[in-house]
Image: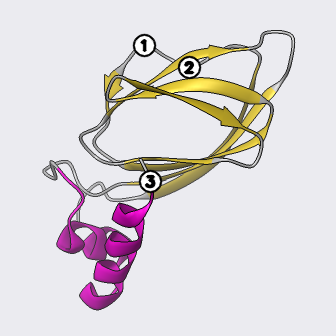
């Protein structure tokens, strides 16, 4: 698939995230240090150290607030599901990860069963 990728990184900041934006990729975020309040599709979530936060393709995500007196560290993983994908599908994930469709089906089942 053209443009498919898996990226990861660590964000360390004293300020919260960006303006609301609709994402086209899958993001898995881990709050490694600190706490913050993020918004997903208009619903606010309080996140603390050790929490995971999943953002699916098509969802609208933004940072709401964090404590500027305390450091926030977020470990993140971004999986491209292709520029044409409007939602997480087994085919898009299998192509992006270059894995068997059965494995992608299991990943999608587990991801979609997580609380949002």
Instruction: Give the residues drawn in magenta, as a range.
Output: 87-114
Which residue occupies 28% across, 90% down?
102
The residue to which callout 2 is attached is 17
> Do the numbered discs 1 and 2 sit on residues whose CB atoms are within 8 Å?
no
Q: Is residue 89 left or right of residue 10?
A: left
First reached walking from the N terminus: tag 3 or tag 1: 1
> Do the numbered discs 3 and 1 sit on residues whose CB atoms are within 8 Å?
no
Residue 115 - label = 3
The residue to which callout 1 is attached is 19
Give how far across and how far down residue 79 sits, in percent: 42, 56
Give how far across and how far down residue 95 sits, in percent: 26, 73
Which residue occupies 23% across, 55% down?
82
Judging from the image, what secondary structure is the residue with disc 1 in? loop
Q: Nearer the viewer, residue 6 or 23?
A: 23
From the image, give the main secondary structure of the stretch colored magenta: helix
**Crowd class of label 1 (few under 14; some 14 to 19; many from 20; radius 10 Å):** few
Which tag is nearer the camera, tag 3 or tag 1? 3
Give how far across and how far down residue 56 sits, in percent: 34, 48
Is residue 17 shown above or below 47? above
């Amino acid at each position: 698939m053209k443009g498919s990728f898996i990226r990861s990184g660590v964000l360390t900041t004293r300020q919260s995230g960006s303006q609301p934006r609709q994402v086209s990729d899958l993001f898995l975020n881990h709050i490694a240090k600190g706490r913050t309040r993020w918004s997903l599709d208009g619903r606010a979530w309080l996140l603390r150290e050790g929490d995971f936060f999943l953002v699916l393709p098509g969802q609208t995500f933004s940072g709401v607030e964090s404590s500027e007196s305390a450091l926030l560290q977020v470990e993140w993983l971004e999986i491209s599901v292709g520029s044409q994908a409007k939602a997480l599908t087994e085919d898009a994930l299998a192509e992006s990860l270059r894995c068997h469709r059965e494995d992608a089906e299991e990943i999608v089942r587990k991801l979609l069963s997580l609380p949002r």
